[in-house]
Image (cartoon, grey):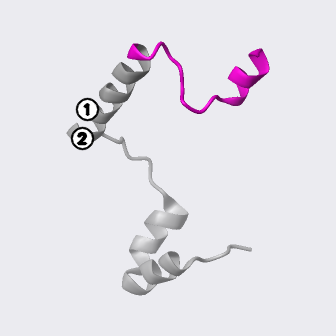
Amino acid sequence: MRIHSHSSLGSFENCPRQYWYQYIGKPDVERVDTIEAFLGKRVHEALETRSGGLSPHPTLSQRERE
């Protein structure tokens, strides 16, 4: 049984076809990053490289190594 959220019901009320594409059909569409996403990824990569790969919040695998 599918559970519907407020936004999914609003989507159906707005346009049933939109609801179908968003929640049921989900066509395979090639996703292209925006310039903001591209630059954001590069900034995060640079900061991670600069910090030596250390995260302020250790991941589970980092904790297991200690």
Residue 51 visible in rendering: yes
Nearer the observer, 6 or 22: 6
Residue 63 is situated, as x and y percent measured from the top left of the image, at 74, 24
Q: Is residue 41 left or right of residue 19?
A: left
Residue at 51% from the left image edge and 82% from the top image edge: 9
Q: Is residue 61 left or right of residue 8?
A: right
Image coords of residue 57 (percent x, y)? 59, 33
User: Which residue is at the front of the view, 61 or 15?
Assistant: 61
Question: Residue drawn 38% across and 80% down?
Answer: 15
Q: CA distance from mark 2 to mark 1?
A: 5 Å
What are the residue bounds of the magenta stretch? 50-66
> Quick one: label 1, few (<14), some, or many (20+) residues within 10 Å?
few
Tell me the kind of residue under disc 1: Leu
Q: Answer with left or right where residue 46 lies relative to residue 65.
A: left
Asked whether the residues under the numbered discs 2 and 1 touch, taking CB atoms below 8 Å apart as contact, a structural biologist would say yes
Q: Amino acid at mark 2?
A: Glu
- The disc label shown at residue 21, or none: none
Query: Against 46, is 57 above or below?
Result: below
**Which image quarter holds the N terminus?**
bottom right
Q: Residue at x 50, y 61 (%)?
A: 25
Residue 64 part of the magenta-drawn span: yes
Decide: is 2 above or below 42: below
Say which of 14 and 44 sits in front. Answer: 44
Mark number for residue 36?
2
Q: Position of residue 24 (x, y in %)?
A: 54, 65
Q: Is residue 34 visible?
A: no
Q: Dot 2: what SS?
A: helix
Query: Label 2 crowding class (10 Å Cα cut-off): few <14, some 14-19, many 20+?
Result: few
Q: Secondary structure at mark 1?
A: helix
**Residue position for label 1:** 39
